[in-house]
Structures are given as C-alpha cells and as structure tokens.
Image (tube, rainbow, N blue to C red):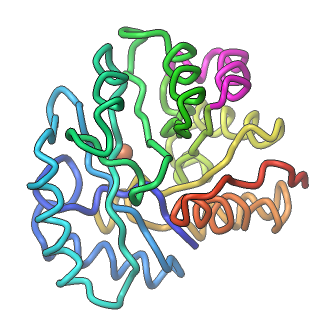
C-alpha cells in the first residue's frame, strides 16, 4: 500500500512532534503493510504556513536518514486553498509549494467553512494548466459533504478525491462514513490515505479501510485506491479511472 497523506514531518504542524515520533509513525505504517508514504506537512494553513521550502526539505532529509529502509518516503504537502494559491502554483518549480513527491499532483485542503475562491474555479484552472488537483478528505469538510452534487461537479472539472481511511471505517462518525459510501458507490473516490497525525490516535494505518472497501466494493477497488492510484502519483503518471467494481 502507498499512503499519500500523512503528517510525518516532525515539528512543523499538528503531526509528529519530534523525529522519534515520526520514526515511530513510519514503523506503524510499515507494520500495517504500507510500503511507501508521502510526508505531507500543512502549507498555507493559517496556523502552519510552512512557507520555507528549504526548511521542510532539510527536515525531510533528517527524517529519511532516521527511517532508513523501513518505509520509502517522499515529500509533499497538504496545501490550503486560498485566494493566492494559483499565484503560488504559477511559481512552481520555484516558490514555496511542494507537490506530491515532486509530481504534477497537488494535495489541496479546502477550508472548513466556505470562504475564499470558488473551488470549481480553482480546480478548473489547475486542470487546464496541467496540474492534477487532489482534494484532501472532502468527506470531512461539512459544506462539501452536505452537498454531494458539488463533489460530482468538482470531479467533472478535474478534481481527484482522497478519502481518509478513518472516515471509511466510520471512526470519524456517521456523516463522514456516509459521504465515503456515496463517493465509492458513484466511482468518485480516487485515493484512500491515512492523514495520520501520530502513531496511535490517528495512525498511518490503511488496512482497516482496505478491508471495508474490499467487502463493500471489491478487492480490485481497494487495491486501486490504496496501491495502484497512489503509486501512479509517485511515478507522476495519470491514474486509472476506468475500473468499476
Ligand atoms: Fe492532513
């Protein structure tokens, strides 16, 4: 399995505190059967702007050294969508932003309340300029989860949707779980990731969600969302969208 969204980078956000916490998280992931993961610190978040890419890359280098061969790690970010986002994206490959594993995929976090630019416009603009916008856990963003039609529209405009494993299993409550079911039923989910923040309460574990998806939608779908599609991101190639259960 490949985990595209985990707050493994120590000391930069609400994820791993210290290097040893990050190493422990990587051990938990490896024990669960995760072979590769992207460390995705928050960027452009009001509390964790993380605008210094050099600092993030230096911390990542230390993490790589400490983790060794336990887990294949790459660097990315969970980037908050705001009115300046597209300007920052235009600066790539310079500027502050970190695409997922250096690919054309950008992991984007919409705000918890509907402020800022219209996500449909952001997704459209990114898609037509050759980026692949991945929306982090739409099922945990109330104003999106309550309007499934808006999620259909975002996918039609080029968004890819990342569900969080603990939403799929029901650990984040009924509403998130029901939204996941809707997205899986309608082939609107493209990735399942852990969004891990620590080694125990929000761990980097995917196998529980894999079991739920395999039971409900088939093993092929479970593999697509946790292995094939995230692997395509690491290799910077398009994902397969044509597999139905
Ligand atoms: Fe996250």
Image height check: is 55 above or below 114?
Answer: below
Residue pictured at 39% horizontal, 82% vertical: 71
Nearer to me, 104 or 15: 104
Residue 54 placement, left or right of 98: left
**Where in the figure is residue 102, as x and y percent of width and height?**
39, 57
Quarter location, residue 55: bottom left
Q: Quadrant of the C terminus?
A: bottom right
Residue pictured at 13% horizontal, 51% vertical: 12
Image height check: is 77 above or below 133?
Answer: below
Image height check: is 82 above or below 234?
Answer: above
Please tell me in which quarter of the rendered image ligand 1 is found.
top left
**Where in the figure is residue 198, as x and y percent of width and height?**
28, 62
Residue pictured at 49% horizontal, 47% vertical: 104
- Which residue extends farthest right? 245
Whether 148 is among the magenta residues is: yes
Quarter location, residue 117: top left
Q: Main secondary structure of the magenta part?
A: helix
Residue 206 placement, left or right of 147: left
Residue pictured at 28% horizontal, 33% vertical: 91
Q: Which residues are magenta?
A: 142-158
Q: Quadrant of the N terminus?
A: bottom right
**Where in the figure is residue 193, as x and y percent of width and height?**
52, 56
Looking at the rendered structure, the number of numbered marks drawn on it comes to 0
Nearer to me, 233 or 36: 233
**Where in the figure is residue 207, as x and y percent of width and height?**
59, 70
Quarter location, residue 95: top left
């Amino acid at each position: 399995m490949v985990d595209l969204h985990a707050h493994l980078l120590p000391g930069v956000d609400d994820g791993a505190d210290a290097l040893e916490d990050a190493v422990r998280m990587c051990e938990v992931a490896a024990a669960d059967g995760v072979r590769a993961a992207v460390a995705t610190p928050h960027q452009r978040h009001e509390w964790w702007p993380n605008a210094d890419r050099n600092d993030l890359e230096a911390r990542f280098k230390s993490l790589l050294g400490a983790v060794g061969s336990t887990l294949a790690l790459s660097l990315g970010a969970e980037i908050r969508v705001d009115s300046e986002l597209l300007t920052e994206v235009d600066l790539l490959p310079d500027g502050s932003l970190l695409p997922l594993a250096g690919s054309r995929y950008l992991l984007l976090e919409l705000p918890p309340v509907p402020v800022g630019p219209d996500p449909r416009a952001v997704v459209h603009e990114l898609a037509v300029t050759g980026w692949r916008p991945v929306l982090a856990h739409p099922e945990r963003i109330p104003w999106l989860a309550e309007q499934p039609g808006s999620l259909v529209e975002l996918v039609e405009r080029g968004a890819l949707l990342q569900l969080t494993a603990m939403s799929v299993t029901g650990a984040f409550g009924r509403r998130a779980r029901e939204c996941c079911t809707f997205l899986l039923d309608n082939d609107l989910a493209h990735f399942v990731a852990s969004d891990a923040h620590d080694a125990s309460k929000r761990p980097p574990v995917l196998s529980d969600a894999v079991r739920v998806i395999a039971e409900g939608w088939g093993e092929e779908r479970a593999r697509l969302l946790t292995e094939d599609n995230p692997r395509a991101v690491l290799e910077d190639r398009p994902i397969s969208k044509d597999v139905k259960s």
